[in-house]
Each structure stands twice: as structure tokens, then as C-alpha cells.
């Protein structure tokens, strides 16, 4: 096989391996990736939170669908926080990389709560959803307080 084809295949393999083994062409892409994933997650979580707060009319199907998307997307941002992605257009604090265990712990807790929120939303019970929204929102906030610049 020609060298070029081997390189192409290797490149394709790396791309397909995302996000389990995160490889981005540039740090800038990793930053964009995590921000966009967090944005998509927030839009879906925010919709459910809005219903829980009575700011958006409650629609059980929309809530369940949105929570399921937020749950899935909550698994994505972390691949974009690799080494060397601390500088650029980001509010990510340096502590993410110097206190990685704590950051990972927050990230894991958020994902666990997002999964519970999705389960709660599937029940269609607004009281269950409210409790889960509060728990999930708390995990967003604690990580932002410690690891996101103002
Ligand atoms: C959101 C959002 C957050 C969290 C947080 C909850 O919708 O963008 O960062 O909820 O405000 O306390």
C-alpha cells in the first residue's frame, strides 16, 4: 500500500475513534468542540429547566426528548479538554489541568445527574423532573464556580 493511503486510513481511524480517544487537528478545534457540545447540552437542559420553573409550558414528550439529548451530549465535552487546550478562546481555568481529578469528579457527577434527569423526564412526572433539574443544575454550578473564569 502506498504511504499516502496508509496515512489516509490512519487519519480516518483516528477520526472514527472520537471521542473515546480524542484527537483533534488543532487545540482550537478541541476548544470549539467542547464549547459546542456544552452549548447543545445547555439548550436541551435549559428547555427542561424552563418547564420545571414554569417559564415554558410543560410538554412531557419535549421534556423527555430534550433530557435524553442532554444526557447523551453530556458525555461529549470532556474529549475536548485534552492537554494543550488551556489557551485560546476559552473561559476554562488552568485548574482544570492542574486539578484534573476534581474536574473529572465534577464531570462524572454532572453526567450521572443528567442520566437521572432523563429517567425522571421519561416518567412524565413534573415533580420528579423538578427535583432532578435542581440536582443537575447544582452540578453545573459547582463546576463553573471552581473551573470557569467569569
Ligand atoms: C443552565 C446553564 C447553567 C446551569 C446553571 C444551573 O441552564 O447554562 O450553567 O443551568 O445555571 O445552576
Image: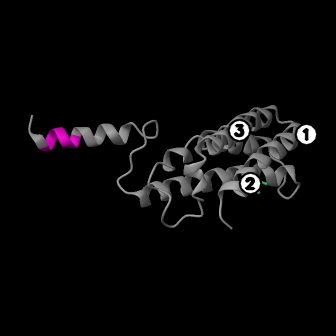
Residue corresponding to mark 2: 46
Residue at 39% across / 50% down in the picture? 24
The local crowd at label 2, few if under 14, some if 14 to 19, many if 20 or more residues have their Cα within 10 Å, is some
Classify mark 2: helix, strand or loop: helix
Asked if residue 57 is positioned above or below residue 149 in the image, the reply reads: above
Residue corresponding to mark 1: 127
Residue corresponding to mark 3: 109
Magenta segment's dominant SS is: helix
Among all residues in the image, which is located at the extreme front? 98
Q: Position of residue 54 (x, y in %)?
A: 89, 55
Among all residues in the image, which is located at the extreme right? 127
> From which residue to which does the magenta span run?
4-8
State yes or no: discs 2 and 3 in contact (Cβ < 8 Å).
no
Q: Quadrant of ligand 1?
A: bottom right
Classify mark 3: helix, strand or loop: helix
Snapshot quadrant of residue 108: top right
Q: Position of residue 35 (x, y in %)?
A: 56, 57
In-front residue for pair 103/138:
103
Quadrant in which the N terminus appears: top left
Classify mark 1: helix, strand or loop: helix
Q: CA distance from mark 1 to mark 2?
A: 17 Å
Residue at 48% across / 63% down in the picture? 87
Label 2 CB-ligand 1 distance < 8 A: yes
In-front residue for pair 33/105:
105
Q: Position of residue 10 (x, y in %)?
A: 25, 38
Comparing marks 2 and 3, which lies closer to the viewer?
3
Comparing marks 1 and 3, which lies closer to the viewer?
3
User: Residue 6 colored magenta?
Assistant: yes
Q: Which mark is residue 140?
A: none
Amino acid at each position: 500500500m502506498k504511504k499516502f493511503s496508509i496515512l489516509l486510513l490512519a487519519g480516518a481511524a483516528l477520526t472514527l475513534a472520537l471521542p473515546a480517544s480524542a484527537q483533534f487537528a488543532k487545540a482550537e478545534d478541541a476548544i470549539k468542540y467542547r464549547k459546542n457540545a456544552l452549548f447543545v447540552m445547555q439548550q436541551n437542559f435549559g428547555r427542561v429547566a424552563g418547564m420545571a420553573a414554569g417559564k415554558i409550558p410543560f410538554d412531557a414528550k419535549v421534556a423527555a426528548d430534550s433530557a435524553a439529548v442532554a444526557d447523551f451530549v453530556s458525555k461529549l465535552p470532556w474529549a475536548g479538554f485534552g492537554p494543550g487546550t488551556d489557551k485560546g478562546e476559552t473561559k476554562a481555568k488552568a485548574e482544570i489541568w492542574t486539578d484534573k481529578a476534581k474536574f473529572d469528579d465534577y464531570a462524572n457527577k454532572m453526567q450521572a445527574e443528567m442520566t437521572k434527569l432523563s429517567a425522571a423526564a421519561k416518567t412524565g412526572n413534573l415533580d420528579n423532573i423538578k427535583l432532578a433539574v435542581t440536582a443537575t443544575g447544582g452540578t453545573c454550578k459547582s463546576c463553573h464556580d471552581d473551573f470557569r473564569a467569569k
